[in-house]
Image (cartoon, rainbow, N blue to C red):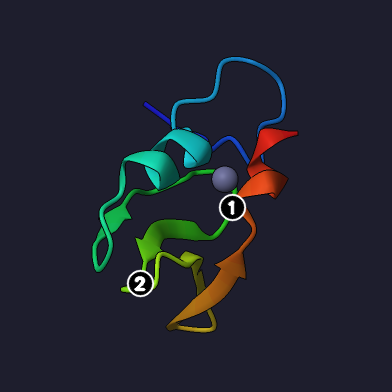
Amino acid sequence: MAEYCSQCTPQKGFDIDLFEISLKLERGYSTAFICEGCNNRAIYKDEQGLIYLVRYEQDDYKYYPLNIEELLT
Ligand SMILES: [Zn+2]
């Protein structure tokens, strides 16, 4: 069954809620998932509480700082 994250599926019915994952994450931990619609692969929260979106691009995992407010729209 294909699963899609809330970033690439703006309408209701997505399976992977990036906002909820970000809220539940403890500092220093990441939650991995596989979205069928985009390259998002994990959410990571560092020791300072900053949140990163981990995307798989060009055979490598890249970390992008994520503003949690962007997930609310
Ligand atoms: Zn996605």
**Residue type highlighted by circle 1:** Cys
**Residue type highlighted by circle 2:** Asp
Among the 4 quarters of the image, the one containing residue 23 = top left
Residue 21: x %, y % from top left: 39, 41
Q: Nearer the viewer, residue 25 or 16?
A: 25
In the orientation shown, which residue stands out farthest toward the top?
A: 12
Residue 32: x %, y % from top left: 30, 54
Residue 56: x %, y % from top left: 48, 71
2 or 1: mark nearer the eye: 2
Count the numbered circles shown.
2
Residue holding disc 2: 46
In the orientation shown, which residue stands out farthest toward the front?
A: 48
Query: Disc 2 and disc 1: Cα gap in Å?
Result: 23 Å
The structure residue drawn at horizontal position 71% and vertical position 29%, both measured from the top left corner, is 10
The structure residue drawn at horizontal position 25% and vertical position 54%, both measured from the top left corner, is 26
Q: Is residue 33 left or right of residue 22?
A: left
Q: Nearer the viewer, residue 44 or 14?
A: 44
Mark 2 within 8 Å of ligand 1, using the beta carbon: no
SS label for mark 1: loop
On screen, 34 above or below 53?
A: above
Residue holding disc 1: 38
